[in-house]
Every structure is written in structure tokens, then in C-alpha cells.
């Protein structure tokens, strides 16, 4: 039998957001592009997210946040990713993130930040182009 | 082969990254996977494997979360393999089972892995079985496998389990039909979940009636109990039933069921190996496409071709 690789993506919701419509739209678009999506559900701590990424051995982590807590939570998450030695995973972020924060987020290893209106096609293409599968 | 050896060592020491990487190799069917699995195979057989199946939305994942919680309280380590279907149209999958179990994601004594079935009928069973083996070899006391539905593939997967729990819920309509369609034989324990719902007792007595009619089954008599996975009600009773079943298996039935498992797996392995090598052979000789064309043109059919290949193989 031949090998059958699939892009596995963790869609994670850090912080205290109370809805996940955006995250679910992203999840659906990536799934429809043939990827396997693991979803964490709401209100995840950085530890939970990183540990889940590790156990699920995903290729990509998508962080979705609306609450404005990204400045605290994202550096924590990126720190843990390094600590656990899974920094080969591609990390992107989406949700409500002010433009002026994007530079800092990219500096800590988040590859791209997508605003609320991003067409899902752009996202799918980004993931496909940044994973070697 | 160094990488493979390192992974094996890591799995045996319970290293989470190694466990995760090994399962990925298995589900991608990478060349080093069979070797790793056969080495790990020697170290399996210690875990009690519980299969949890039943219709969509009956509460399987919620119930498993409660089982994990109670098992952890009792000091047991737990592995979970949660299987969801791959979309036949896009090849993608949404793996949502672990949402209900996230509380345990940072617990060192718990390892949860989601898997898509990747549309492989026989292969599905194999990758899942091997993932269960990895968790077993990593030293988990209990390994739980969640699958959805009542189809043949679920029945296959469930063969890896020592104890099979079929989770139903009131108001899911064709439950009883589903059971009759073949899940009946595989269940060691029936659960009517969502006991907080009105017609739970009706479902319970329907299943009870059905179980009473089935007097043929010797040995273990499957029974039915109610749970409310949302609150955890009925979980202690369920664990007691699982424990009883485990005791029952210890008294000899386990040996028999292991023999059955070995037999099915041996048959599967032979089928896979022979089919693979025959197909490869045909492809190498450039006959594969021609054969397909002939079948499409109705000049021959798959069974005649297979017969001819078998005869040829036997002559050699
Ligand atoms: N009322 C009630 N709802 C429950 C109970 N157990 C689970 N649910 C709900 O039923 C829904 C489905 O639960 P899951 O645990 O995801 O069910 P599942 O069988 O794993 O679903 P699939 O994996 O999609 O097949 C969720 O909304 C749960 O909150 C229960 O005991 N009572
Ligand atoms: Mg589930």
C-alpha cells in the first residue's frame, strides 16, 4: 500500500471568547480542501492548545481569537511550542487583531495573521503553500 | 532505521512526542511503520481495550470523558483513539470528538488521538488497531476507541476491543434497527445515554426485550444500563459492568477472543500482502492498465482476472 499523507490542522480557541463562528468557518474551508481538522472547542489555555498539537501531531496550528488577549496568550503559546520542541509546526492566527500588533506576532514565530474578512480561499492557499505535503 | 529505533524506545518509555509521531507514521502508512509496529507488538497485551460505538450524537465522547475522569480518580492511565469519517468527496475530515475531552489534554496520564478513517475499508481497521497497540505499548492501563455508526468497518475496528460498549440515546429513531443490522453481536454492554430525556425508559425496555429474545448467546450475557453522560450519572455502574466483563474474560474467554483476533488479523495481513504484491507486479509489467481497460470493455471481469492470477500464483 502506498503512503497517504494528509495535512492535519489544529484549530484552537485560546482565551475567553464566547463564540466560535469564525473558527468554524475556517475549519470547514480547510476540511473542504481535503485537510483533517482537529478542533479544540472554546476557552483553551495555552498549555491545552500546545499539548493537543503535540498529541495530535498536527502540521499546522490555527489560533482564533476575538477577545484582544492575543498579546498575552500568543507569546505564551509560542513559548510552549518551542519548549516542547514542536516549533516545526506552521502557526497562523485569525480573528480580531489590531494591525499594529501584527509585526510583533510575526517576530515570535506566527507566520501570518488574517483579519475577519479574509476570504477562505486565501487561507487555504496559505496553508497549502506553507506545508510540504 | 535509527529514527524508528528511537521512536520505539520513546513509545516504550511513554514519551508523548514519540507516541504521536509513531501514530502518524502508521496512519500515513510510511515504509518504516510495519517494522515499528511489529517491534511494539511484543510489548502489547497489557491494556484493557474498550470499544465505544453507536449512532452519531448519542453521547459517546461525553461518556468517554466521564470514564476518563473516573478512571483517573482511581489512578489508572488512559489512552483514547477517536475515529471520525473522512468525507468521500473532499478527502477532508472534521475531528471533533476531543472537544468534549479537552479537560484531560494536559493530564500526563491521558493521551488522546483523533483519527480520520481515510475511506479505507480494511486499512481503517488496521491503522486504528495499530494506534491502539502503540498506546498499549506505551503503558496505558486502559485504551478506549471511539467509532461512529453501525457499519461493517465499525464492526471490524471493534474486534480490537476486549469490551465493546454500544451507546444509544432515546429519540434517535432507528436505533433498534441499527442494532438489528449487525451491531447486536458485537455489544458486550448496551448503554442508553441521555437518561435525563423523557423516553429513555422506553428505549431501555425495548433493548431489554430484545436481549431477552436472544437466548442463543452463550457465556457473557449483554445487558443494558442508563447513563447521563452530561452529569456523570451511571458512570460508576458502567465501570462496574466493564470490570465484570473483564473478570469474565480472564476466566478463559479472553484467550478465545484473542485467538479470534489473531485469526482475523492474520487473514487481513495475508490478503493485504498478497494483493499488494500482485498489483505491484502487474503494474511493473505494464499489465495493470490493460486489465482495467479489458474489464471496462466487459471483455472480462475482476473475479475472472483474480481467479486467473491465483492459478498462476499457485503454479509457481
Ligand atoms: N441531555 C443530554 N445530552 C447529552 C448527554 N450526553 C451527551 N449529550 C449531548 O449530546 C451531544 C452529542 O454528544 P457527543 O458526546 O459529542 O456525542 P457523540 O456520540 O460523541 O457524537 P459523534 O462523535 O458526533 O457521533 C452534545 O451536545 C452533548 O452535550 C446526556 O446525558 N444528556
Ligand atoms: Mg464523538
Image: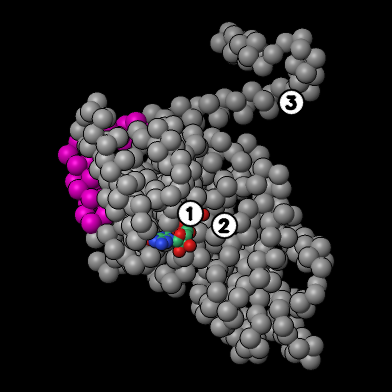
Q: Earlier in the sequence, mark 3 or mark 2?
A: 2
The residue identified by callout 3 is: B283
Q: Which chain carries label 3?
A: B
Say which of marks 1 and 3 sits in front: 1
Picture quadrant of residue A88:
bottom right
The answer to whether residue B234 is left or right of residue B33 is left
Residue at 43% x, 56% y: name it: B59
Q: Does any atom of ligand 1 lie closer than 8 Å to the CB of label 1?
A: yes
Residue span colored magenta: B237-262
Image coordinates of residue B119 in percent, x first then y, are 61, 41
Say which of marks 1 and 2 sits in front: 1
Q: In which quarter of the image is the N terminus of chain A?
A: top right
The main secondary structure of the magenta stretch is helix
**What is the spatial separation of the Cα atoms under label 3 and label 2, in whole angstroms?**
35 Å
The residue identified by callout 1 is: B57
Picture quadrant of residue A90:
bottom right
Q: Are marks 1 and 2 on the same chain?
A: yes
The answer to whether residue A117 is left or right of residue B8 is right
SS at mark 1 in the image: loop
SS at mark 2 in the image: strand
SS at mark 3 in the image: helix
The answer to whether residue B152 is left or right of residue B185 is right
Picture quadrant of residue A76:
bottom right
The residue identified by callout 2 is: B95
Q: Nearer the viewer, residue B39 or B245?
A: B245
Amino acid at each position: 500500500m502506498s503512503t497517504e499523507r494528509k495535512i492535519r490542522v489544529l484549530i484552537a480557541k485560546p482565551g475567553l471568547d464566547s463564540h466560535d463562528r469564525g473558527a468554524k468557518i475556517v475549519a470547514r474551508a480547510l476540511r473542504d480542501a481535503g485537510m483533517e481538522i482537529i478542533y479544540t472547542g472554546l476557552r483553551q489555555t495555552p498549555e491545552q492548545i500546545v499539548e493537543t498539537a503535540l498529541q495530535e501531531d498536527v502540521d499546522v496550528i490555527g489560533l482564533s481569537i476575538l477577545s484582544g488577549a492575543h498579546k498575552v496568550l500568543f507569546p505564551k503559546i509560542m513559548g510552549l511550542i518551542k519548549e516542547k520542541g514542536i516549533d516545526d509546526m506552521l502557526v497562523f492566527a485569525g480573528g480580531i487583531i489590531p494591525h499594529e500588533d501584527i509585526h510583533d506576532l510575526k517576530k515570535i514565530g506566527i507566520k501570518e495573521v488574517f483579519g475577519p474578512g479574509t476570504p477562505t480561499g486565501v487561507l487555504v492557499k496559505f496553508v497549502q503553500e506553507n506545508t510540504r505535503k | 532505521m535509527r529514527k524508528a529505533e528511537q521512536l520505539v524506545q520513546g513509545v516504550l518509555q511513554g514519551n508523548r512526542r514519540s507516541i504521536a509521531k509513531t501514530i502518524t507514521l502508521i496512519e500515513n502508512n510510511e515504509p518504516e511503520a510495519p517494522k515499528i509496529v511489529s517491534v511494539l507488538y511484543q510489548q502489547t497485551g497489557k491494556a484493557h481495550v474498550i470499544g465505544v460505538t453507536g449512532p452519531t450524537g448519542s453521547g459517546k465522547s461525553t461518556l468517554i470523558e466521564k470514564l476518563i475522569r473516573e478512571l483517573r480518580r482511581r489512578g489508572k492511565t488512559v489512552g483514547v483513539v477517536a475515529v471520525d469519517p473522512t468525507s468521500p468527496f473532499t478527502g477532508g475530515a472534521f475531528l471533533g470528538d476531543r472537544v468534549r475531552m479537552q479537560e484531560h489534554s494536559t493530564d500526563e496520564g491521558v493521551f488522546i488521538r483523533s483519527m480520520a478513517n481515510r475511506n479505507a475499508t480494511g486499512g481503517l481497521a488496521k491503522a486504528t488497531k495499530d494506534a491502539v497497540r502503540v498506546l498499549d505499548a506505551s503503558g496505558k492501563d486502559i485504551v478506549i476507541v471511539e467509532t461512529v455508526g453501525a457499519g461493517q468497518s465499525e464492526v471490524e475496528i471493534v474486534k480490537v476491543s476486549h469490551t465493546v460498549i454500544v451507546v444509544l440515546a432515546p429519540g434517535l429513531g432507528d436505533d433498534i434497527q441499527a442494532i438489528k443490522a449487525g451491531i447486536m453481536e458485537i455489544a458486550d454492554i448496551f448503554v442508553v445515554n441521555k437518561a435525563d430525556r423523557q423516553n429513555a425508559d422506553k428505549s431501555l425496555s425495548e433493548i431489554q426485550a430484545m436481549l431477552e429474545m436472544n437466548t442463543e448467546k452463550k457465556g457473557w450475557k449483554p445487558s443494558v444500563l442508563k447513563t447521563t453522560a452530561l452529569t456523570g450519572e451511571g458512570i460508576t455502574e458502567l465501570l462496574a459492568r466493564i470490570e465484570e466483563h473483564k473478570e469474565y474474560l480472564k476466566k478463559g474467554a479472553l484467550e478465545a477472543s484473542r485467538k479470534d483476533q489473531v485469526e482475523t488479523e492474520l487473514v487481513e495481513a495475508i490478503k493485504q500482502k498478497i494483493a499488494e504484491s500482485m498489483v505491484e507486479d502487474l503494474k511493473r509489467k505494464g499489465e495493470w492498465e490493460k486489465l482495467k481497460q479489458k474489464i471496462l470493455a466487459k471483455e472480462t471481469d475482476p473475479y475472472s482476472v483474480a481467479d486467473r492470477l491465483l492459478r498462476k500464483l499457485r503454479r509457481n
